[in-house]
Image (tube, grey):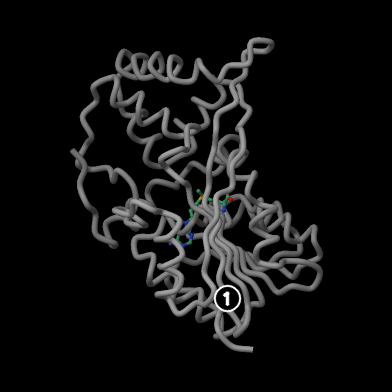
Amino acid sequence: MTTTWDATSFDAFERRGWAGRTEAYENGFARLTAHTVAPLLDAAGVGSGTEVLDVGTGPGVVAAAALARGARVTAVDASPEMAARAAGACPGADVHTAVLPELPFADASFDAIVGNFVINHLGDPPAGLAELRRVLRPGGALALTCWERTSMRATAVFGEAIAAAGIPYPADLPSSGPFLADAEDRAAAFAELLEHAGLAGACARRVEWLHHVDPDAWWAAVITGTPITGSLIGRQDAATAGAVKRHYEALIAPYAHPADGSVALPAVALLATARRPGI
Ligand SMILES: C[S@@+](CC[C@H](N)C(=O)[O-])C[C@H]1O[C@@H](n2cnc3c(N)ncnc32)[C@H](O)[C@@H]1O
């Protein structure tokens, strides 16, 4: 059984959950999220001279790619450790520790805002979007990604392995965030959320790829680098964690590459874009 979390409790979990995970995230899970960086920047029209904000920058992969395009980059993350890592990785970017839905920027500061797999980590997504709209200039573009959970094998196999091992879902961990929690058509619901925040021309499309990875490296990446799945498997005793791992190995077996033992796990994200109405 899973429980519904209020915004404050979910945000508090997020702050605890990311603490100490920066290096593991950067070396593991960030290699999955990196696949959407170019489409995200393209969708927001980020190029030479664009004044862009990267929210929830993590170790700064999107911010670094925006800098490489010649953009003027500001980046924020709620985790001081992540922000410090991003600052180190992105000399030339203006990096802050800041927590949505409150950003330390004046109204209409940015030509474009991007957020790669961040909206799904907010306790109050509509409040976060209202703040992003505030700091976006009229006519500016917002582009955000989230996971398309139903067909997202690269991460779904972990939830299925946990269930197959018979681990009951603990009440002190959220099953997921409030973002699109009950949506059946997540793409339509994502676009609607942007429209409800006062943004115009919202649409969301699927981005699909294969995540090529060593199975043991991917297991370690998710266990060490993600707040929910990492916490859930990380707290099990060795025998139970071993059972989860065996189910995981069975679930990923159909995606194995016979030549080198790697797997090619289907990954699917939603990329949503919209503009702040105005000039
Ligand atoms: C899944 S990671 C994505 C990191 C990066 N954008 C990437 O592409 O890999 C989510 C990041 O969002 C940050 N985050 C979560 N809630 C946030 C909030 N309310 N405000 C700002 N950042 C937040 C976390 O600290 C974490 O670094």
> Residue 225, image x and y in percent?
49, 37
Q: Quadrant of residue 168?
A: top left
> Residue 194, image x and y in percent?
46, 70
In this picture, is 191 found above or below 251? below
In this picture, is 63 found above or below 127? above
> Residue 197, image x and y in percent?
42, 76
Instruction: Give the left or right position of residue 71, taking residue 211 as reference.
Output: right
Q: Residue furthest top?
A: 258
Q: Between residue 259 and residue 110, name the one nearer to us.
A: 259
Instruction: Give the left or right position of residue 8, taking residue 31 as reference.
Output: left
Amino acid at circle 1:
Arg
**How many discs mark residues in the rendered view?**
1
Q: Which residue occupies 30% across, 24% down?
A: 236
Q: Residue furthest bottom?
A: 279
Disc 1, SS:
strand
Q: Which residue occupies 39% across, 65% down?
A: 125
Instruction: Give the left or right position of residue 148, taking residue 206 as reference.
Output: left
In this picture, is 276 found above or below 39? below
Q: Between residue 232 and residue 164, name the one nearer to us.
A: 164
Q: Is mark 1 within 8 Å of ligand 1?
A: no
**The N terminus sits in image quarter:** top left
In this picture, is 113 found above or below 162? below
> Residue 109, image x and y in percent?
62, 81
Q: Which residue occupies 67% across, 54% down?
A: 39
Residue under label 1, please give it: 275
Q: Quadrant of residue 278?
A: bottom right
Q: Quadrant of residue 107?
A: bottom right
The crowding category of the residue bearing disc 1, from other C-alpha atoms within 10 Å (few below 14, some 14 to 19, many at least 20), is many
